[in-house]
Image (cartoon, coloured by chain):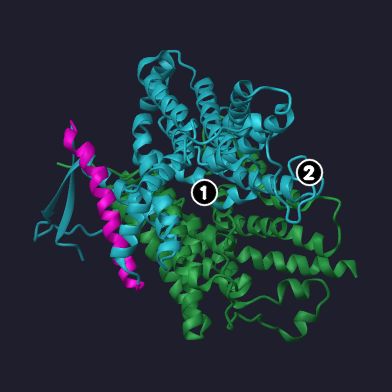
Amino acid sequence: MNDNIWVLMTGDSVALATTLILAALGALFTERSGVLNLGVEGVLLTSAISSFIAADSSGSVWIGLIVGSLAGALLAGIHAVLAVVLRANQIVSGLALVIFGTGLANYLGKPYEGKTISVKLTDLTFGPLTDIPLLGPILFEQDIITYLAVLAAVVSSLYLFRTRPGLEVRATGDDPATVDAQGLMVSTIRIRYTLFGGLVMGLGGSWLMLAESAAWHQAATTNGVGWIALALVVFASWRPIRLVIGAVSFGFTLQLPYTLQAENITFIPQAFLQMVPYVATLISLIALSRPGSTNALGAPKSLGIPFVRDER
Amino acid sequence: MRAPFRLQFEQRTETPKRLGILVPVVSVFAALIAGALFLLATGHSVGDTYSNMLSDGFFSSTGITDTLGLSTVLICTGIAAAFAFQMNLYNIGGEGQLYVGMIGATWFGLYFGENLPSFLMIPIVLLGGALCGAAWIAIPAWVRARLGTSEIVTTLLLTYVAASLVNHFIYRSGSYFRAPNTMFPQGRQVPDSAMLSPIGDTKMYPTFFVVILLSLALHWMVRRTEFGYRIQVISDSPRAARYAGISARRTTVQVMLISGALAGLGGATLIVGSFQRLDPGIVTLGYGYAGIVIAALARNNMAAVIVSGILFAGLRSGGDKLQISTDTPIHIGVMLQGAILLFALGGEAFRRYKIRVVRTPAVRVEVTA
């Protein structure tokens, strides 16, 4: 009996990891091009409510996913203009995006407070595969976006490390002056990947609404997942495959309090269980730090630094 | 394919004085215009919303005193953020330090309050809050100085931990902070000696003036003391600081601890002021996050934080009353905060650069790779 709930929990963690993977993957692409977008939390919330409204009014999950993703790209576009075109302080711009996005999402979501939507992403079934003990429910009972997220991470890894455009992104993040000397437009590349990053984060935010909570509860909808995603990128040393592994383990710790509560294990106060993912992220960040430089982690060398060409 | 125009940035050697005032003012108006378009698009009345916000926030006697009362905590979190930001230390966990400051202030109030007179208790509670706020940032400060761990993420993560702590102290039965024998869990009120009375009929407390003086004192300290000079040298040029024998590590820890203490003090002003007890409702108010916006709009100038703090308090307080006066969701206030900051950031480019639109040459020599 007990085994059962742990299997369910692992399955749920994989599902929870979907938003984390997508949000972090979006941040990873943005950061690989040298732009630091701290606004993930705001992007997630805005795309979540946009997808909610779109799915609710159209009755289609797919329209919800598309609208939510576009909303994410739109919000990231503000950051791209400020950070890349106007060379603003990227940290403050990202934070402004969180505040603006949170306000916007709550404003738009006011009429939908506590409402649920009728449509929902359904889990795919793989017939007999789902019946495999242990592995079946974990691996073969998820919805399509979850599979897509994992696939996307693998494809991203190949793209970044095995293709020419991937090389260009990485070079733009590490050494924009060289990219510029090669005749490529640094700002165009950065804007493109900031927008793309927002699109991917937006898909993650929409998924949160359309597969997970399915009820709109203001800021509680994301509950800091955007910030965990940012920490996850550091944790994964800006590599997509490691990111998936990290996301699943964080999904597990996020899920833990609810599982233990369902199991009637109450000797640890609920509040302390809720701290686990944040404390775990904190500890792993500190453990990965080395004195002197952040390069030991594999951070893009020009992350957060606007590119200024000597202009005549 | 290339755009026919491109922006040319020319670094200004000297920023004209008028731009220093013009840019923030224009960004506030630009944000209000953007907000107006948004209100129109969602079918709310622009005139009603703004006139209600302005009169409830600034231009009525209860409005302005409510605003100044609210500005007390916002100026605290504003200077907390500005103080760290000026050294490029992004303490964005002021929110969490504020919660822990509240917890600490409440504890000192409950523990000592029965036996000590008010003139001792108020300083003890305020300092207790500041101390706990500083304690909450101690680990991020230390690992930032020692290992270079990004303080942005660590301080933020600890905010979620702090929020869980507040809930724990109120919802756990038999908790020291919880009022006994109430139907709905709520905090235990601190003794009278740990409370200030408001000024006259208003929601302003004497702590407002303390916080104003503190901002001015910090402003002076940054400009006129050796410690302030050290901060400036490190933020301008870490290398020069090293050659001058200034320990960036020690200053990093000091600056972050002070920043955390200021946010904690903000929490304590709530306890001696309007809250009087630990209230889990604080986690929905976002006073700490607002400090980041306030600091950024004031361009990390401690004296300017007073102005931007009052401006934001007015937007908040006027926005919060919208629910009563109109059907516009109160979140328009938060949206406007974000929008003002976004426009101010964009405006910053015009302060630093002369921006010209130039036509790209029609004929280009194409270099084939």
The residue tagged with tag 1: helix, strand or loop?
Answer: loop
| Disc ID at residue B286 | 1
| Disc ID at residue A179 | none
Which-is-in-front pick, marks 1 and 2?
A: 2
Q: Is residue B292 above or below residue A229?
A: above
Chain that the image shows in cyan: B
Picture coordinates of residue A37, whole percent (x, y) = 44, 52
Quarter occupied by residue B6: bottom left
Q: The numbered mark 1 sits on a residue in which chain?
A: B
Q: The numbered mark 2 sits on a residue in which chain?
A: B
Task: Name the kind of residue labelled 1 in the image.
Answer: Gly
Picture coordinates of residue A295, whole percent (x, y) = 51, 39
Instruction: Please tell me which residue lies in front, B83 or A259.
Output: B83
Which residue is outermost to the right?
Answer: A1
Q: Which residues are magenta?
A: B14-43
* Mark 1 in CB contact with mark 2 (< 8 angstroms): no
Quarter occupied by residue B110: top right
Task: Judge whether residue B29 is colored magenta.
Answer: yes
Q: Is residue A142 above or below residue A85?
A: below
Q: Which residue is mark 2?
A: B175
Residue at 37% of width from left, 65% of height from top? A74
Distance (Cα) linking label 1 and label 2:
25 Å
- Indicate the quadrant containing the C terminus of chain A: top left, top right, bottom left or bottom right: top left
Q: Which tint is chain A?
A: green
Residue at 72% of width from left, 61% of height from top? A255
- Characterize the magenta stretch by its predominant secondary structure: helix
Picture coordinates of residue A95, whole percent (x, y) = 44, 49
Residue at 67% of width from left, 45% of height from top? B166
Q: Is residue A40 above or below residue B166?
A: below
Q: Residues within 10 Å of mark 1 (few under 14, many from 20)?
A: some
